[in-house]
Amino acid sequence: MFKISILTDNPNSWILPYVEKVKAALLRTHSVNHCFNYENIVEGDIAFLLGCEHLIPEEVLRRNKHNIVIHPSKLPHGKGFSPLAWQIIEGKNTIPIVLFEAVKEVDAGMLYYCDELQFEGHELNDEIKHTQGEKTVELVLRFVNEYPNVTGKEQSGESTFYPRRTCADSELDINKSLAEQFDLLRVVDNNRYPAFFWYDNHKYILKIYKV
């Protein structure tokens, strides 16, 4: 039995239903502490940092033998924020996703697994997040099931960073067609950061649903 912590530092994160799936599976054979503040991470074997938006202090990382993050890009390329959304906007539908060790430096730790998220090009934000969430569950359970017989490797290659996305990144260009901007429409959130455009000094919100 392993002593496992799961941190989700945003209590409203989209990933919470998938964290619940992870917890239900792990609680059958392991001790699981799910918390929403890094101060509540307990000493143990593994801490999974899922859906976290803030860096974890080094002294907290030392509480566990491993601190695991899952990130949808082929590190060290695509460090930073919202890498899945940025890659969808770039027109990509095969997105690498890695499970790696959290260290003091941002997205710089040892890589354990590299997998892929596969899309067809029509999926909207909720479907994209669902695919990411299910793969997160799969990778977490794989790590626990194979632990401690897991071998990592150092990152290599060019290091690049994506910036944090804001509501302003959901702006549409009225001089372009919807087809030209469809990949942007795929990743907007109708409630938190909906698509919008300006026309004649007025701001309009455009929401998208699949029928």
Image: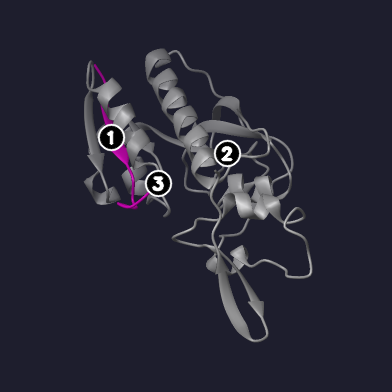
Which image quadrant for residue 177?
A: bottom right
Q: Secondary structure at mark 2?
A: loop
Name the colour scheme.
Answer: one colour
Comparing 35 with 21, the one in front is 21
Comparing 64 with 207, the one in front is 207
Tell me the CA gap for discs 2 and 3: 15 Å
Q: Secondary structure at mark 3?
A: loop
**Which residues lie in the magenta part?**
1-13
- Local packing at callout 3 (Cα closer than 10 Å; few below 14, some 14-19, many 20+) is some
> For the point 37% across and 49% down, which residue is it?
13
Quadrant that contains the C terminus: top right
In the rendered image, which residue does mark 2 sit on?
72
Q: Is residue 145 above or below residue 58?
A: above
Quadrant that contains the N terminus: top left
- Local packing at callout 1 (Cα closer than 10 Å; few below 14, some 14-19, many 20+) is many
Which image quadrant for residue 153?
A: top right
Residue 28 is situated, as x and y percent measured from the top left of the image, at 22, 17
Q: Is residue 50 above or below residue 168?
A: above
Comparing 117 with 64, the one in front is 117
Tell me the CA gap for discs 1 and 2: 21 Å
Which image quadrant for residue 119?
A: top right
Q: Is residue 184 above or below residue 65?
A: below
Q: Main secondary structure of the magenta part?
A: loop
In the rendered image, which residue does mark 1 sit on?
5
In the rendered image, which residue does mark 3 sit on?
14
